[in-house]
Amino acid sequence: MNVPKSTLVQMYRDMVTIRVYEETMAQVYLEGKQPVFNIAAGPVPGEMHLAAGQEPVAVGVCAHLRKDDAVVGTHRPHHFAIAKGVDLKKMTAEIFGKVTGLGRGKGGHMHLFDPEVHFSCSGIVGACIPQAAGMALAFKMRKEPRVAVAFFGEGAANQGAFHEGLNLAALWKLPVVFVVEDNGYAISVPKHKSTAIATNADRAAAYGIPGVYVGENDALAVYEAAGEAIARARRGEGPTLIEVKTYRYFGHFQGDPEVYRPKDEVARLREDDPIQKLKNHMLQSGLFTEAEIAGLEAEAKQRVEEAFAFARASAYPDPSEALMHVFVD
C-alpha cells in the first residue's frame, strides 16, 4: 500500500500525541485522589476513560477526512478528538473544568464539542450512531460532499440504536461510516459473553451494506479499510460498517481494578504496540530517518505539555455563568 509521506507524518504525530496525552492524563487525574481514591478530588474530577492502545482506529480513519466532515465519538473520546484536529489546549481546559475550555468548563471529558472541526461526543452508549446518520442525512439533503463517521465500542453494537441507525442509513444511502472499536470488553464483559457472532462486521449483510473486519491493531490496515469506505460514502453509494480489533492499555475507567483481565494481558499486548509498528514501517520505507521521527515525537510531547500547562493556568468559570448557555430566552 502506497501511503504519502505527508499522511504518514500526520498519522504518526497524532498517534504519539494521543499516547502521550493519555499517559499524562492518567497521572494528572490521580492528583489528589490518593492514597484513598476519591473520584471528586483533584484537578480533574469525575470519571475518566482513556484510549491508549486504540490510536490506530482514530488516526487510520481520520487521515481520510476533511475539516468539514463530521465525527461523533464515545465516552472514550480523546483519540478521536485529537485525530480530528480538535484544539488541544481548549480540550484539556474543558476536561479541567476551566472557562477557556471548549464548553467553558461545563461538559468535561465525555462531552467535547468543537464546531470548528465538526467533532462531538457524549457519554450515552450508542448515541453516536443515529447522530452521525442524522448529520449524513443533512449533508445529503443539502447536496454537500461531506461524510459523517460514528465511532463506538463493540458493546454498543448490541444497542437498538445500532440497528435503527444502520437500517435508515442503508435505506437512504447516507454518506456515513460506522466504525466499531472492538477492544475486547464492554466495561468488564468480554465480547464472547455479550455478542452472538464473532465479528460485528458480519451484521452489515442484514442491511445490504459492506462489512469490513480489520483483525489487527494496525494504523495502516485501518487506513486502507477506511479509505474505500469514506470514498464510497462520498460517491453517494451509502454507508459501510467497519470493525477493528483493537485494545486498551488502561481499565474501562481510571480507578478500575481490572479484576476481569488476565494479569499479564496488557504486558503481552504492549509487545505488539501499534506506534512502534508504524514507526518500523516508516523506517523500512526509506522515507524517514530516526532523526525525523524523533522530531515528530518531540513535537507531539511539546503540544501535550503546552496543553496541560494552559489548562492548569486557566481560570475556573465565575459562578454567575452557572445558567449561561443552559436556557434560551
Image (tube, rainbow, N blue to C red):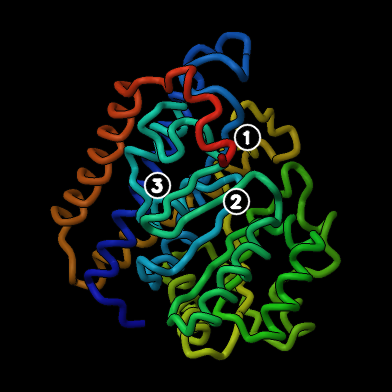
Quadrant the N terminus occupies = bottom left
The Cα atoms of the two marked residues, 3 and 2, are separated by 16 Å
Give the camera-side residue of 221 and 103.
103
Tell me: 273 left or right of 265: left
Disc 1 secondary structure class: loop
Q: Would you say the residues marked 3 and 1 are in contact, meaning their CB atoms lie under 8 Å apart? A: no
Q: Is residue 276 visible?
A: no
Q: Report crowding for label 2: few under 14, some 14 to 19, many 20 or more residues within 10 A (C-alpha).
A: many
Residue 187 vs 312, above or below: the answer is: below
The residue depicted at 53 percent of the width and 89 percent of the height is 236
Q: Please give the residue where the numbered disc 3 appears in the rendered image.
A: 18
Foreground residue among 324 and 275: 324
Mark 3 element type: helix
Disc 1 residue crowd, few under 14, some 14–19, many 20+, Cα 10 Å: some
Image point 48% across, 84% down: which residue? 143
Q: Residue at x 63, y 54 (%)?
A: 183
Q: Which residue is mark 1?
A: 253
**Looking at the picture, how far across and down is residue 195, in whole percent?**
82, 62
The residue labelled by disc 2 is: 74
Q: Is residue 262 above or below residue 214?
A: above
Answer whether labels 3 and 2 touch (C-beta < 8 Å): no
Question: How many marks do you count on the picture?
Answer: 3
Q: Is residue 121 left or right of residue 192?
A: left
Instruction: Please state which amino acid type lies under the numbered disc 2.
Output: Thr
Label 3, label 1: how far apart the Cα atoms are: 17 Å
